[in-house]
Amino acid sequence: DTGVSQNPRHKITKRGQNVTFRCDPISEHNRLYWYRQTLGQGPEFLTYFQNEAQLEKSRLLSDRFSAERPKGSFSTLEIQRTEQGDSAMYLCASSPRTVAYNEQFFGPGTRLTVL
Amino acid sequence: GENVEQHPSTLSVQEGDSAVIKCTYSDSASNYFPWYKQELGKRPQLIIDIRSNVGEKKDQRIAVTLNKTAKHFSLHITETQPEDSAVYFCAASIGGGSYIPTFGRGTSLIVHP
């Protein structure tokens, strides 16, 4: 499968614990996005990378959230001191280099449940 | 920032009928408008998109129209089939920059056989 992959697919954690998710984009894509999706809502932008540079972060992204893309390939999203309100589907998407072409290819998501 | 409103939130049709989903956007600089289909438990997938230099685009049973003056765009599905049942999201973004899309809240389309 050459699409976007995410791991783990499901994560159940207790409030206050830290969690880390991984996203592997399509190999030739230089743009990578993280979104959060809750039931009945569209994907909500969290952060964006172009290669290894984190170029934008949503104001919704609290200090407990951090993301990295160290070598411009895979990315990780860490949530520290999780809260019940963090329960959601976390989606990763990647997009190709072509300047005028910005279709996003989504991964299957990581569903986080905070107890 | 950009704000995208999507209506209706739920749409129920009989197989063979047409379905129309409408979205409005607020930022006149937005110039790329994709539509994604998300089946239950699956990832969103692009079904059609339109750029601001055209007013309409069609792909088999699916078409999208764009009115830049009024800042609204619509998805039209003709001859609906049960496999069209899914949640559909519209989005708006500005090409040439970071391309970060703002999504609508989604429309749950139910096609009854």
Image (tube, coloured by chain):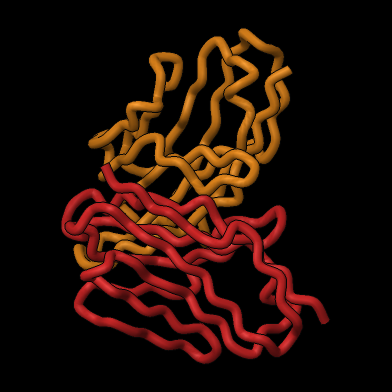
For the point 64% across and 18% down, the residue is A84
For the point 26% across and 35% down, the residue is A56
B59 vs A21, nearest the viewer: B59
B69 vs A86, nearest the viewer: B69
Residue A65 against residue A97 in the figure, above or below: above
Q: Is residue A28 at all visible to an observer of this figure?
A: no
Residue A66, image quadrant: top left
Number of numbered discs on residues:
0
For the point 20% across and 63% down, the residue is A99
| Residue B46 in the image, given as x and y percentages of width and height | 48, 67
Residue A21, image quadrant: top right
> In the displayed structure, does residue B83 sit left or right of residue A88?
right
Q: Quadrant of the N terminus of chain B?
A: top left
Q: Quadrant of the C terminus of chain B?
A: bottom right
Q: Is residue A45 at all visible to an observer of this figure?
A: yes
> In the displayed structure, does residue B40 sit left or right of residue A91?
right
| Residue A112 in the image, given as x and y percentages of width and height | 65, 30
Residue B14 against residue A97 in the figure, above or below: below
Colour chain B appears in: red
For the point 51% across and 38% down, the residue is A36
The residue lying furthest to the right in this view is B113
Residue B88, image quadrant: bottom right
Residue A77 against residue A92 in the figure, above or below: above
Residue B27 against residue B47 in the figure, above or below: above
| Residue B99 in the image, given as x and y percentages of width and height | 27, 53
B36 vs B80, nearest the viewer: B80
Colour chain A appears in: orange
A39 vs A46, nearest the viewer: A39
The residue lying furthest to the front in this view is B70
| Residue A30 in the image, given as x and y percentages of width and height | 30, 51
